[in-house]
Amino acid sequence: MNATNRRSRFDRMFDTLNYTLMTIIMLAVLYPLYIVVISSISDPDAVNTGGVWLLPQGVTLEGYRRIFMEEQIWIGYKNTLLYTSLGASLNVALTLTGAYALSRSDLVGRNGFMFLIVFTMFFGGGLIPTYLLVKNLDMTNTMWSQIIPSAVSAYNVIIARTFFQMTIPKELQEAAEMDGCSITRFFFKIVLPLSMPIVAVLALFSAVSLWNSYFPALIYLRDRELYTLQLVLREILIVNEAPEDTSLAGAGEDGGMLRVVDIMKYGVIIVSSLPVLALYPFLQRFFVKGVMIGSLKG
């Protein structure tokens, strides 16, 4: 009885410590996001002087009004949606077809192909060779520079290959072959309908990666009409300059211009992050499943 009581007290202490630690971690993660939210609706002078740390001060929606009036931000939104949808579709198509081929035991040299794919996860050519390759392919300053170089992810290939090996039994392939079903027809008629979970996982992984990507746009794009939303966000946050030829040009003197940028920058973070933040809670189980699939068998 005493041992049981001691163990129960220990369990309660452990649970209390665990909940306390997790609460601290949760607050550490959520507080910066909360600061961005309340700063986006607060007076920029109060934000710059450190007056905003718990509650918004001088509540105003002027920043959001100017954001939705800003043409360059809408262009960035449109381009990001286009690059994300096309890039995710291409990534899913190439990953599924390549991973299924690598999952078949009758593919000659599949271990060698997998070695080459895994090798790219540890060693890369670097920025300069990659840039020269994209330039020689005449993809600089085009939307394809945002899509083609990231069309296939080695990590996604491994996840999809593992899924096929665990889900599609070899007996099913042999039965289809005996019925005269070709490999291509077997893939589209049988494998894909059974693989909707991994399709969702790959689509989410690639879409989130493309949505958050800004470095390729920074390197390869020069035309402002091709800018992504993240590049516009960077321009406002880091360069601290308002986009050219926009409604902000009439903001007045330099001090007024900087104040307008201060009003906008927190709101732009919210607007650019809102799609992913809104979707992730509903799709979290797919992310978890994708990680679990890749960790079960390699």
Image (tube, helix red, strand yellow):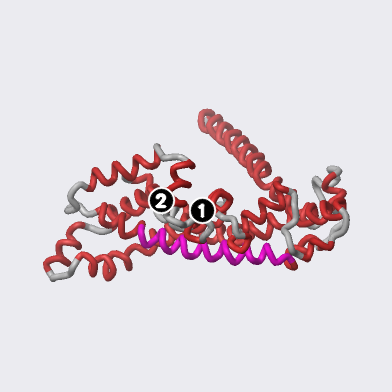
**Could you classify mark 2 by the number of other residues whose Cα lies within 10 Å: few (under 14), some (14-19), or many (20 or more)?**
some
**How many tags in the picture?**
2
Q: Is 291 on the left or on the right of 161, as rendered? A: right
Residue 224 seen in render: yes
- How many other residues sit within 10 Å of disc 1, few (<14), some (14-19) or many (≥20)? some
Q: Quadrant of residue 17?
A: top right
> Quadrant where the C terminus lies?
top left
In the rendered image, residue 104, in percent from the top left (x then y), is placed at 22, 54
**Amino acid under disc 2:** Ser
Circle 2 residue: 153
Mark carried by residue 64: none
The answer to whether 229 appears left or right of 68 in the picture is: left
User: What secondary structure is found at the residue carrying circle 2?
Assistant: loop
* Mark 2 → mark 1, Cα distance in angstroms: 11 Å
Q: Main secondary structure of the magenta part?
A: helix
Report the residue at 23% width, 48% height from top. Answer: 110
User: What's drawn in magenta, residue-wise?
Assistant: 70-94
Q: Residue at x 49, y 65 (%)?
A: 85
Instruction: Indicate yes or no whether the magenta region holds residue 88.
Output: yes
Point out residue 187 in the picture as x, y percentages from the top left corner: 26, 65
> Residue flagged by tag 1: what amino acid is it?
Ser
Residue drawn at the location 19% of the way across and 62% of the way down: 173
Q: Is 28 placed above or below 168 here? A: above
Asked if 92 appears above or below 36 in the picture, the reply is: below
54 is within the stretch colored magenta = no
Mark 2 and mark 1 in contact? Answer it, CB < 8 Å.
Answer: yes
Along the line of sight, the residue nearer the viewer: 280 or 105:
105
Residue at 58% over, 50% down: 218
Relative to 279, residue 185 above or below? below
Which element is circle 1 on?
A: helix
- Circle on res. 209: 1
